[in-house]
Amino acid sequence: MEDPIRTCKATPTDAGIISRIIERSIRVGCARDHRNHPQTVATWTHNKTIEHIQPWLTDPRLYLNIALLQDKPVGVAMASISGKVAFCYVQPEWFRRGAGQALVQDLEGWLISQGLRQARLNSTRTSEAFYRHLGYQPCARAFMVSGLQAIPMHKGLISVSSKG
């Protein structure tokens, strides 16, 4: 039996590993979306550097988390106080093993604790089935951004206290 995935809030010292996980997930795991087009990859990754991530980690309007397996980081995700899930990236070798689901459920818990009743995101084609599995539904027409197709999706959030 595999050890359970654990999530925790990211700290400023995690900026380097967050950057590496995101870049690798984009380059390897999202190749279907960017088709290894150098300009598309560069546009997608340019704002995922340590220098860009560090301010996110101290911004109270944002929540970044990390998925850990045996204390080894295997994925990262971020949401904003506005209810937007900004991203969820998992190391490709950890796809379909629960890390992404744990990350998104933790983000949703944070959003609920902030008083939000809905989460929204823009999915890639690669991630659409994953988000549908978690209960997200398309809510607008897909559009192109930086050479990638984005699918607007949303999900109603239910707090534990309102489940009755």
Image (cartoon, grey):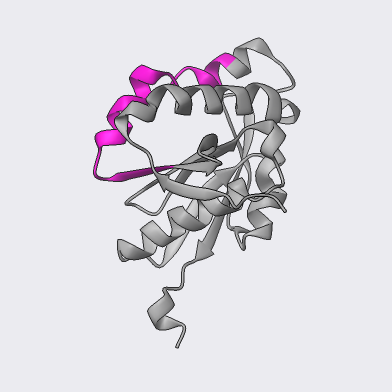
Residue 62 falls in image quadrant: top left
Residue 99 visible here: yes
> Farthest residue in the top direction?
38
Quadrant of the snapshot with the C terminus? bottom left
Q: With 55 as the anchor, is 139 left or right in this view?
A: right
Residue 30 visible here: no
Out of 38 and 61, give the one closest to the viewer.
Answer: 61
How many marks on residues?
0
Q: With 14 as the anchor, is 147 left or right in this view?
A: right
Residue 70 falls in image quadrant: top right
The x, y position of residue 98, in whole percent, is 64, 51
Q: Residue at x 38, y 26 (%)?
A: 15
Q: Residue at x 67, y 57 (%)?
A: 132
Residue 52 sits inside the magenta stretch: yes
Q: Is residue 125 above or below residue 164?
A: above
The x, y position of residue 8, in whole percent, is 41, 47
Q: Residue at x 56, y 22 (%)?
A: 23
Q: Residue at x 49, y 54 (%)?
A: 120
Quadrant of the snapshot with the N terminus? bottom right
Range of the magenta residues? 42-65
Out of 121 and 78, give the one closest to the viewer.
Answer: 78
The x, y position of residue 84, in whole percent, is 43, 49
Q: Is residue 27 above or below residue 8?
A: above
The x, y position of residue 71, in whole percent, is 50, 39
